[in-house]
Image (tube, grey):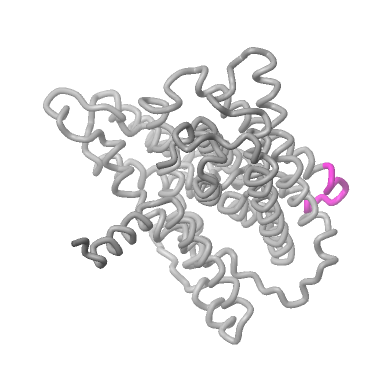
Amino acid sequence: MTDPSGIQAASIRRFLLSPAGGATALLLASLAGLVLANSAWAAGYAALITTPMRLSILGAHGPETLEAWVSDGLMTLFFLVVILEIKTEIVSGHLSSLRRIALPLIGALGGMVVPALLYLLVTYGHSEAMRGWAIPVATDAAFTLPIILALGRHVSPGARIWLMALAIFDDVLGIVVIALFYGSAPYWPAMVAALLASIALIGANRVGVRTLRGYGLGCALLWGALLASGLHPTLAGMVTGLCLPATTHGKDAAQASPLARASAALSPFVTWVVLPLFGFMNVGVSLAGVHAGMMLEAVPLGIMAGLVIGKPAGVFGATVLCTRLKITTLPAQTPMSMLFGLSLLCGIGFTISLFIANLAFSETWLVTSAKIGIFSGSVLSAIMGWLWLRFLHGRNVLPPQQAGVQ
């Protein structure tokens, strides 16, 4: 006789390990921050996220509040995990050849250029608003993956892989944009120290260092150097992820690679602690005085236009051009109508968009306007993509056995 409690426990474990579980935690934490910021506990919420946490050893450039430590410190681990995911796919997964990499990478590039240009077009003449041009360029994998999994046989396995690869490339491009355009004036001695730390990490990979502690120490030193250099410190996660060995050899062949061990150790922490904390502290915007007319202001209108129109136009247009020029081919069992629906989902920009908004604007009212645009544009993109793939694309639904549905 089957034990109901055992079935329930297994279901809970599957949920906790699933992308949907992580997305649910991020969404609930974000909603909690929004509710607290607009409740009788708003002052306590503000006091919590601005709790002083300055470390004198880091000098004047170090994070000074709990919110800053999450954004500048813990989010480094998020970017590290993103790089580990894409490196795994490149080394031994679905991106192990140039043809497989080309399609999502070109789509990601199109999905970056078009929304940025559209945002600049909408905000032209508003010098302060134009600083946020990069806000609508990234797709949030934490929310898109649960949606396409929930769509089941309405999305082919190849299309799912394409979208997730594109979302990961989006995140990587977002990291590069943050490093290049949203740092402060460079401090060259610290830049040299960061370069030396990077060379040390590359050297550790070349000589075959397999202990995670060594790479962890190198990442911490690089993070500190970047903090003082003017570049954004989360770039340390990207460099460290690229340097972690993805293979094993010799006496260590029976063990998991350093990359696999780091990913297994960090992914649950990032999913269940880092991202929910980030959402909780960054979505808490007071809606006092907010009205529908604000949607027509330059910043929120530019972000919504970038996410809802620019993102799918850039992704879909670049992908179609890529196939027409015979650079690569579409994933198996993925018609253009399905690809268009997935391109609509690419307008879900949340984590990276919020991150860039906080870097782009120093004025509170601009940050608030940006967050309104991010929420509105992301929700619209999610609804449009879901409706297209679930209903308008219904005539192209795959049989369960072809879609990988059990």
Q: Quick one: quadrant of the C terminus?
A: top left
Residue at 57% over, 40% down: 154
Question: Foreground: 64 or 138?
Answer: 138
The residue drawn where x is 82% and y is 55% is 298
| In this rendering, position of residue 27 left or right of residue 126 | left
Picture coordinates of residue 390, whole percent (x, y): 63, 46
Q: Where is residue 82 in the image (x, y as percent from the top left)?
A: 45, 41
Residue 194 visible in the shown view: yes
In this view, 12 is above or below 317: below
- Using the image, determine if residue 124 lies above or below residue 245: below
Residue 400, how many percent across, how many down?
Answer: 47, 38
Q: Is residue 347 left or right of residue 84?
A: right
Q: How many labels does the image show?
A: 0
Q: Residue furthest top?
A: 326
- The structure residue drawn at horizontal position 21% and vertical position 64%, both measured from the top left corner, is 3
Q: Determine the residue located farthest toward the bottom in the rendered image.
A: 40
- Near-viewer residue (45 or 168): 168
Give the residues in magenta: 121-129
Judge whether residue 128 is colored magenta.
Answer: yes
Q: Quadrant of the N terminus?
A: bottom left
Q: Residue furthest right?
A: 125
Which quadrant of the structure image shows residue 321? Answer: top right
Is residue 230 magenta-colored? no
Q: Is residue 169 in sight in this rendering?
A: no
Residue projecting furthest to the front: 1
Question: Which residue is nearer to you in this view: 81 or 386?
Answer: 386
List x then y, in percent, for residue 202: 35, 28
Image-quadrant location for residue 263: top left
